[in-house]
Image: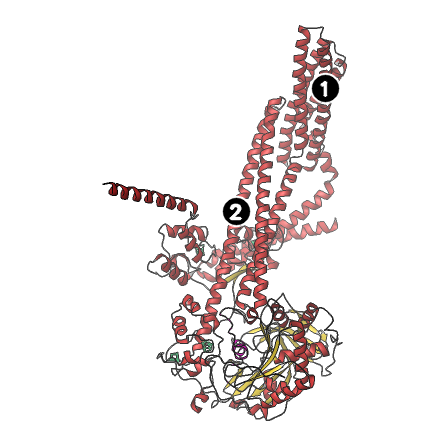
Amino acid sequence: MQTTNIFSFHGGIHPPENKAQSLTLPLGHPSLPKELILPLSQHIGQSSRPLVSQGEQVLKGQAIAINNGFLSSFLHAPTSGSITAIEERVIAHPSGLSDLCIVIEPDGDDNWTERKPLNDWRRISKTDVLSYLAEMGIVGMGGAGFPTQVKLQGAHKHPLTHFIINAAECEPYITADDMLIREKTEQLVLGIEVLQHLVEADQVIIGIEDNKPQAIAALNNALAQHNSTIQVAVVPTKYPSGGEKQLIQLLTGKEVPSGQHPADIGILCQNVGTCVAVHDAIYLGQPLITRFTTLTGDALKAPQNVEVLLGTPVKHLLDYAQATHKKISRLVMGGPMMGFTLNSIDAPIVKTSNCILAASKKELPAPAPEQACIRCGMCEQVCPASLLPQQLLWFSKSQEFEKAEHYNLFDCIECGACSYVCPSSIPLVQYYRHTKSSIREAREAAVKSDLAKQRFEARKARQEAEAAEKEAKRLARQKASAQKTEGKSTATEAKKATPPAAETKTAILDESKKLKVDIALAKNKLKKLQKQLVEAQENEHVEEINHLQLQVTEQEKILTSLEQQLEKMATTPAEKSTKAAPAPVNEELKKAKIDVALIGAKLKKAQKQLAESPDDKELKANVSELEKGLVQAQSLLDRLTPSTAAQKADMLQKASSKPTVNDDLKKAKIDLAIAKAAVKKVEKALKKAEELKAPEADTLRQQLLEAQQRVDSLEKALSNPQTQSPMTEATESNASTDESAAKNEQIKKQKIASAMAKAAINKLKKRLAAEPDQAESIQQEIAAAEKRQQEADALLAQLTQSQDTM
Amino acid sequence: MLTVLLAVGILLALSLVFGAILGYASVRFHVEGDPIVDQIDAILPQTQCGQCGHPGCRPYAEAIANGEAINHCPPGGQATIQALADLLDVEAIPLDGDHGTETAKRVAVIREDECIGCTKCIQACPVDAILGAAKQMHTVISDECTGCDLCVDPCPVDCIDMVEVGVTSKTWSWDKPQGVAATSMNIIATDRKAEVAH
Ligand code: SF4
Ligand code: SF4
Ligand code: SF4
Ligand code: SF4
């Protein structure tokens, strides 16, 4: 064992220790209470998620709640029994509010679940050990209950120079850690060794105040037996030497810079209770289900330390320590400096409850009324964080939050030293707490309003995009229909017809490109935020974590919405093409038509040339080639035309309402026009072929016949639109299914009608209550509405019946 | 004479050079948008409720920048008016009651078994905080709900309630001490007897 240098920190006070009372009796083991109440939120971060349900039987040490996100913890059943409720119960919190708790009724058997110690912790990876500790529900037992594995992970960011075990226990009255060291010295040393293996610090120091001689002796003894390199540093008793930053300063002389954390300067602190819990988890396979708690105060006849099951109601412990309930003037959880008043004796012990102080009136008299600050400067002299309390008070009173922050309000550890010495009895810490929470609230509100703004703007952008898309579609449709009626038989027009489609396509492409860029940007931002979040979590920047988490989830949402938009974008063109069914075929058709026209033109030219110089062999060959091409193109065109017709028939089958019939009529007319044009063209071609006595004349004639037939049939169909389409047959064949669908629809409609009538009745009744002078007319309306509802209901019943029989 | 000319010449050259630099800087570092509107918008609560008579907070921010009164936003209440007054360096005035009164923070909750799935509320929600599809049950993402009230009226079956957001142990905050001459009960340095013992 080596000795270490002891430094000192600024300020501090020497309140009476009052520690002897609770050390006269040995460690107590209270009996099982009637019920155990386990709040789902016993730690910093998100509440745990219950794993059990009401009525379930659980065994001692069984996990009953699982961590809910990164900064959260597991919870285990402290004894065997049944879950009687998962409900809101009063919890140990300065607000006195209730929160969700799992309530266990012990069965008295104390049956353990299977315990699996992690004996090979030296061999398996550190990450595995850390996650094992997380599963054992280990959180910091000295302060706010920071999940231990998160803290240990954070310590890996910088090489650790010091690993400090906090055994200072500077707060008056509390002796729980003192008792723990005495009772579980061996376990403590083993637990520290496990942690040291995980963090690999250069030096391991146990910092302990000199008012615990027995504990110091026990420690030295155990360390000597272990041949351990762990050092014990005995620091003079001064409040608050047990503050994390103060102890670090005492043992290393280093000051943790404002806004930073010990891990940032290569130091890790753990409480002795946590080290013992780590030992129990690793060597015994026991999760964190008990803790040492000091029961003290003048109102107790038997003040003592107890090893108590988590979830034990304070009332049970008070009875155990023989409390005179009348004498209790204030019940405090924690010490008299940093603790908070409990409003209810039903609140349970949680992982961070180190002391129950049942103080009599004489012990903790009501504080004197607050007076004006006399600028004596005593608070500044005792502040261990080297702040300017009176300045902070000033800014807190005048709500100048920015200035308060500028004066490092968030470095205040709320130790209460300033309040303790203030001759004007100003509850300084309460002002700081209020200001801190106001600032936090303002920050959160700012984040929220930022999110709302983003969502609002995203919605606006989306609506605008939708409107623009609709407009574009409308325009495209207009153009297309205009061209269709004009008849797109000539090449030039066909050419014109293509641009709008291409335009919308390129527009969609553009938009999807933009979206993709947006997504990439959003992803980047998300990554950054996540990184920040992890850093914050590692560094225990508790304030930032919530803020960042909000941002991260928001960013994730934005990302998914963007991706969805993109998907939609990708599917819309497809939809469009299916909706405007013949579009691609139309395109081909157009192309074929253009081909025909082009080849026709070329042919004409060649023929003219041929007429001029009839002996030119080359020209002749050319002409015959062109003629062949023409035939090919024409046949393609023919093939395509019927296929579009078929598709149209398809569409008609799908269509069922009148407007579509109208549409079909239009389409049929257009088809007719196209067919007529085709006939004309073929006629022309035929004429030419005949002039030239080309061999194709026969085929052309045939085509002409076919085309004419088509025209005839189309004309017939047009004149008789009802029978024209195969649709009618199709609907008839589908009639039965359609009917039931229609009935369903009707039933739904009736349901809605009935619901609306009900709502109307409700509204009217409300009005009736509000305006009794118009009672009659309103009553009439109600009657009418009721009738309506009845009618709707009757119809509904009928419909459902008929549907059932079907 | 020559020196005078020289001096004038040098000054002229200098002014040209600096003018060019300034001109370049004003183009190069041009601030996009209207910063005052952004600043006002940042103060407004972004509830997007339209109670100010504008379709959202930003339009109201623009209106304020153009001289509209700063007391038309009920969700922001007096705190927002104060912040706006500080920003614009004008007198803080009480909230204009014509636009509504300041209420505690609320969120919309749909009584889900009564919802008929008409999607009217979705269309009304300014921040897309309602989930649902036609003829399906709808629900409100309470974290995203700004409590703007806009979905309540369109609902044909009146199944949307505005529920006050209660305080939980996570959102609870310490009260401010009453000030001079008041006795605080929650003072943490509770050990007054110790002082007597000094
Ligand atoms: S409560 Fe804060 S301001 Fe007061 S002495 Fe402690 S650290 Fe300093
Ligand atoms: S100790 Fe009290 S009275 Fe003295 S300066 Fe500080 S706040 Fe003011
Ligand atoms: S009244 Fe509503 S919309 Fe107008 S600024 Fe305030 S929160 Fe925004
Ligand atoms: S407006 Fe009412 S009925 Fe319609 S979807 Fe919304 S909650 Fe349901």
- Foreground of the two, A591 or A254: A254
Q: Residues within 10 Å of mark 2 (few under 14, many from 20)?
A: few
Query: What is the number of the mark on residue A629?
Result: 1
Residue at which label 2 appears: A461
Q: Residues within 10 Å of mark 1 (few under 14, many from 20)?
A: some
Residue depth check, mark 2 versus mark 1: number of the one nearer the observer: 1
Residue A379, compared with residue B31, is above or below; it is: below
Let me know if residue A238 is in the magenta part: yes
- Picture quadrant where residue A318 is located: bottom right
Q: Amino acid at mark 2?
A: Ala
- The image shows residue B83 at horizontal and vertical percentages of 39, 61
Q: Does mark 1 fall on the same chain as mark 2?
A: yes
Residue B48, compared with residue A194, is above or below; it is: above
Q: Amino acid at mark 1?
A: Gly
* A324 left or right, relative to A639: left
Q: Which residues are magenta?
A: A236-257
Question: Mark 2 to mark 1: distance in Å?
Answer: 52 Å
Q: Is residue B136 visible?
A: yes
